[in-house]
Image: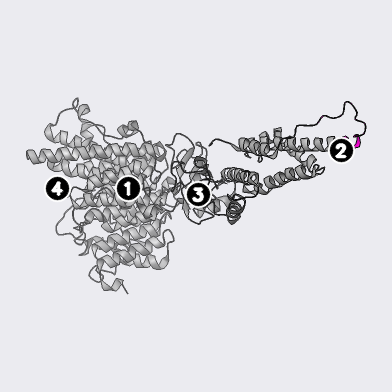
């Protein structure tokens, strides 16, 4: 219903959207719809006059084929796309012929994504050799298959007897006449990216050698400067594991410098300009390769290196603009647009690395670049900076970019470093493809939630990665260790490279997810929620960022309202609030009991052991009972066992295994209580002996013990409960 309306933008959106929704499925109904909009797949009985398809819709359908047959290695579509890269000029593609060839190369790379030489049934096509001809311009279109085959509506390959397709009116071009050679200005861009995607992450040095940058002044004159940028990107897609975020690696990707060219035969001002443009494009290509390699990783070394390159291009652009304004130098006419394009490419690269983080330093730099609104700034530069800001805040900070092979194909298509001049410019790249970055977005934002309040919490975590030998080419290989420190909410590395995730905050109870060893923990991490429980004596990081308002830094307060306000800030348990209200109130018939209750309440809140309050009260009441009754034969053995257990080696073994480092009940209080009860028992024995021997005292009887008072026990309790902030 929408396709028959004939609206180009609507048709493009439907073709690309339906293909993206069924990536890699080879859905037959969608395939028929796409083939209907590609004249190369029409039967010979069809003519272009019977079914007129707009040129931009044809380009969108080509990429739709690549998405629909992604990583399938389907032979028919592979051969069609390989031939369409070198399609002869036609009247309907005059304004976007380069875009058509580029899209055919991208579609070819998607169909054979990452398969390299192992693609079944494609060896006889000699894809590497034919793409090499498209890149370097050797041979002819008849030899490489440019338009030398006809495909019917069912997708069957049929020989082109008599050149029916080339002799048709639609295949003739009245403005461009090309010989049998390959026009590398049209085919090179698509062929370079297709070769990079087909051999992505393969480490094939033989194929990567075809994409080497020129190292001599003579070789520079045979390659267009903007194609050097694509060569650097495609080469590092193949040599994925060799990319390093260092200045030495970046310098190794550059072409001949002006200082090195001084020893070569001088070619005048034009030769110097060629060297400058080639070196700038190679530097921008290295930046984009770093951005793709470490996309979504928030790697600090990569970010620092790319920020330095952005500042370098910004300074170069400012200097060229000033030179062009001061003296109308003709050399700056080509250098200024190149510097602007390279600056936009570097800005997009650093945004890819910090995607979804909202990094403030990167945002400041992008805002400075975005402020320029003079006539010299093109529409494409504003598009690049806007894309960089959008990637920096991808998904509102909840999404980031992935580095899988399908994600790389989508990023290469969306971030093609040739930006348009006007909003309707699609000569070199269809602007609708800029939206395909969403195919590489991944939800890896981990959020910690407090189980008591249900609100998000900022919690420091430790992420342990797998061994460096097994994941040397992983997303975070640039980090100096296999352990990362983050604060939730934060973006995690891919789940496949994570060994464990654990909380490391003194304000929250520890929790660890053993992702590599426990499948249920991995399933819990996929939900991107980490439930945590805050300790009673601490405030959240949002309320107390530096730990200056915790319970260690303030007393409970003498007035009841101060005590109640302090307790409500640190705990919300009704039992503890009721205990503080009734047992720690100022008017009390037993002042010693109130002081004791305040002491144990402060200790239990600070050390998160509120369950021990009944135990403390039980022992205190036992001491009162001993003071009144004089003897407790049942309680004495239990107290002696507790007093002997606390300083034993078992506590040290529990602490070494992750248990509490201190005994739950303080040793000074236990010793004082045992001494008090033993003294009470001795006094009871002495008084009984005195009563039985009152008539005739016996020398050598037990001496009257010195019994400490209950106030002295309370004082010992307070001294024992004193502690420093950990």
Which residue position is annotated with label 4? 376
Q: Does 697 appear in magenta?
A: yes
Which residue position is annotated with label 1? 193
Q: Are marks 1 and 4 in contact (CB under 8 Å)?
A: no
Write down the region rendered in magenta.
688-704
Q: Residue at x 32, y 74 (%)?
A: 1
The mark that comes first in sequence, 3 or 4, is 4
- Label 4 crowd (10 A; few <14 / some 14-19 / many >=20): few
Please tell me whether mark 1 sits on a helix, a strand or a loop. helix
Q: Does 595 appear in magenta?
A: no
Q: Is residue 28 toward the left or the right of residue 343 in the image? A: right
Q: Is residue 718 toward the left or the right of residue 216 in the image? A: right
Whole-angstrom CA distance, mark 2 to mark 4, is: 108 Å
The answer to which quarter of the image holds residue 165 is: bottom left
Q: Residue at x 20, y 65 (%)?
A: 169
- Label 1 crowd (10 A; few <14 / some 14-19 / many >=20): many
**Image spot of residue 101 (x, y percent):** 27, 53
Which residue position is annotated with label 2? 688
Q: Are marks 1 and 3 in contact (CB under 8 Å)?
A: no
**Image spot of residue 631 (x, y percent):** 81, 42
């Amino acid at each position: 219903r929408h396709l028959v309306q004939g609206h180009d933008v609507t048709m493009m959106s439907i073709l690309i959207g339906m293909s993206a929704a069924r990536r890699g499925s080879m859905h037959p109904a969608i395939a028929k719809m796409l083939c209907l909009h590609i004249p190369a797949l029409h039967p010979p009985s069809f003519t272009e006059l019977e079914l007129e398809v707009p040129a931009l819709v044809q380009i969108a359908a080509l990429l739709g084929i690549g998405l629909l047959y992604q990583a399938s290695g389907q032979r028919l579509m592979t051969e069609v796309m390989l031939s369409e890269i070198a399609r002869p000029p036609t009247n309907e593609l005059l304004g976007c012929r380069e875009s058509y060839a580029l899209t055919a190369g991208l579609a070819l790379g998607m169909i054979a994504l990452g398969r390299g030489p192992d693609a079944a049934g494609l060896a006889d096509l000699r894809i590497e050799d034919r793409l090499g001809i498209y890149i370097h311009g050797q041979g002819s279109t008849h030899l490489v298959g440019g338009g030398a085959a006809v495909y019917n509506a069912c997708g069957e390959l049929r020989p082109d007897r008599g050149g029916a397709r080339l002799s048709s009116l639609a295949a003739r071009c009245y403005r461009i006449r090309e010989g049998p050679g390959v026009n590398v200005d049209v085919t090179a861009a698509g062929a370079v990216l297709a070769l990079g995607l087909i051999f992505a992450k393969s480490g094939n040095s033989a194929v990567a050698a075809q994409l080497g940058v020129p190292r001599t002044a003579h070789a520079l004159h045979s390659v267009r400067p903007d194609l050097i940028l694509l060569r650097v990107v495609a080469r590092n897609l193949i040599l994925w594991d060799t990319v390093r975020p260092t200045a030495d690696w970046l310098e190794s990707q550059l072409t001949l410098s002006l200082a090195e060219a001084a020893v070569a035969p001088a070619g005048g001002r034009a030769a110097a300009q060629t060297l400058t443009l080639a070196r700038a494009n190679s530097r921008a290509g290295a930046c984009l390769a770093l951005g793709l390699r470490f996309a979504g990783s928030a790697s600090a070394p990569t970010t620092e290196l790319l920020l330095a390159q952005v500042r370098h291009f910004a300074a170069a652009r400012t200097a060229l603009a000033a030179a062009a304004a001061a003296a109308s130098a003709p050399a700056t006419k080509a250098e200024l647009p190149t510097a602007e394009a390279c600056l936009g490419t570097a800005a997009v690269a650093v945004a890819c690395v910090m995607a979804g983080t909202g990094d403030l330093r990167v945002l400041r730099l992008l805002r400075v670049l975005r402020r320029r609104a003079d006539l010299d700034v093109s529409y494409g530069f504003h598009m690049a900076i806007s894309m960089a800001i959008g990637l920096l805040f991808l998904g509102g900070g909840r999404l980031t970019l992935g580095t899988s092979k399908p994600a790389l194909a989508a990023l290469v298509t969306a971030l093609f470093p040739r930006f348009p001049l006007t909003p309707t410019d699609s000569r070199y790249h269809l602007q609708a493809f800029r939206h395909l970055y969403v195919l590489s977005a991944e939800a890896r934002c981990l959020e910690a939630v407090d189980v008591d309040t249900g609100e998000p919490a900022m919690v420091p975590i430790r992420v342990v990665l797998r061994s460096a030998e097994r994941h040397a080419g992983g997303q975070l290989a640039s980090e100096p260790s296999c352990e990362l420190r983050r604060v939730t909410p934060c973006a995690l590395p891919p789940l496949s490279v994570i060994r464990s995730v654990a909380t490391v905050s003194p304000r929250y109870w520890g929790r660890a997810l053993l992702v590599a060893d426990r499948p249920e923990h991995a399933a819990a991490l996929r939900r991107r929620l980490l439930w945590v429980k805050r300790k009673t004596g601490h405030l959240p990081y949002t309320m107390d960022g530096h730990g200056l308002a915790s319970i260690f830094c303030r007393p409970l307060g003498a007035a009841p309202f101060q005590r109640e306000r302090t307790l409500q800030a640190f705990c919300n348990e009704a039992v503890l609030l009721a205990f503080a209200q009734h047992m720690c109130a100022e008017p009390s018939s037993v002042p010693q009991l109130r002081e004791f209750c305040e002491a144990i309440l402060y200790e239990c809140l600070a050390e998160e052991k509120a369950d021990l309050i009944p135990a403390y009260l039980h022992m205190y009441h036992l001491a009162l009972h001993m003071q009144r009754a004089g003897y407790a034969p049942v309680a004495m053995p239990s107290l002696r066992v507790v007093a002997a257990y606390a300083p034993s080696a078992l506590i040290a073994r529990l602490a070494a295994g992750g248990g509490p480092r201190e005994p739950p009940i303080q040793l000074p209080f236990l010793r004082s209580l045992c001494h008090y009860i033993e003294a009470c028992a001795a006094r009871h024995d002495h008084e009984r002996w005195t009563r039985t021997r009152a008539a005739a005292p016996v020398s050598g009887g037990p001496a009257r013990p010195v019994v400490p008072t209950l106030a002295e026990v309370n004082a010992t309790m307070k001294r024992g409960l004193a502690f420093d902030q950990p």
